[in-house]
Amino acid sequence: MAVKKAKKTLEAVAVAALEDIKAQDIVTLDVRKLTTLYDTLVIASASSVRQTKALAQHVRDKLKEAGATIIGVEGEEGGEWVLVDAGDIVVHVMQPAIRAYYNLEELWSPPTPLRAPVKKAVAKAPKATAKKPTAKKTARKVTAKKTVAKKTTARKVAKKAAKKVARKVTA
């Protein structure tokens, strides 16, 4: 129980340190089910290289004060993405463009289950009464049937005429 409280306090310390220097879009992810490397991942955005470095330094100092062991800090030279590794908690401070490109939130979020197949509610619902076709639809159907009938009778007549002509020519 004391270990969970310590982890929660480290997370709270890291988030408070980020909020002190106005970090943007702070996200905390519990990644215990995804990896054994660490338990909590904190991601935040900074508006400039200077702010990124200042946020990382402030987080590192506050975590040390809270009793965490800082294992390492990566990316302070460039300042676009700085990672502070404190063992059970890892803090990423990133520029918005870098954050959008790598999209760590999606990478480290637990997988969502595929959509369950939708049951056919129509089969269970009572059947609606059939509507009578409108006059226009009925007229179209009748016209279509007449056209087909005319075409077939015209073909039959043409075939009969062709047979008569063929008989006369062969005779």
Image (cartoon, rainbow, N blue to C red):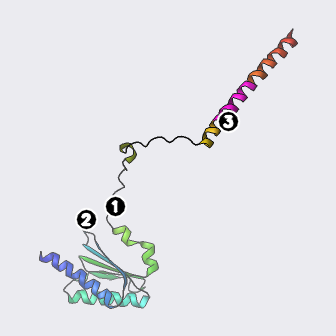
Q: Which residues are magenta?
A: 142-154
**Viewer-nearest of labels 3 and 1?**
3
- Where residue 112 is drawn, which disc sits there? 1
Three-letter residue code for mark 1: Thr
Determine the secondary structure under disc 1.
Answer: loop
Q: With respect to residue 111, does 93 lie above or below?
A: below
Q: Which mark is residue 155?
A: none
> Mark 2 belongs to which amino acid?
Lys
Q: CA distance from mark 3 to mark 1?
A: 55 Å
Residue 62 found in image quarter: bottom left
Residue placed most toward the observer, 120 or 23: 120
Q: Report which quarter residue 27 is drawn in.
A: bottom left
Q: Which of 100 and 135 lies nearest the eye of the viewer?
A: 135
Q: Earlier in the sequence, mark 3 or mark 2?
A: 2
Disc 3, SS: helix
Q: Is residue 104 visible?
A: yes
Q: Which residue sits at x=26%, y=74%?
A: 40
In depth, the one of 138 and 47 nearer the eye is 138
Rendered location of residue 21, percent (x, y): 34, 91
* Residue reaching furthest to the top: 171
Q: Position of residue 57 (x, y in %)?
A: 32, 89
Decide whether residue 145 is among the magenta residues. yes
**What's the residue at 31%, 64% (across, down)?**
110
SS label for mark 2:
loop
Name the residue tied to disc 3: 143
Query: In this image, 5 relative to 111: left or right?
Result: left
- Calculate the distance from the C-alpha at mark 1 to the C-alpha at mark 2: 13 Å
Residue 116 belongs to magenta span: no
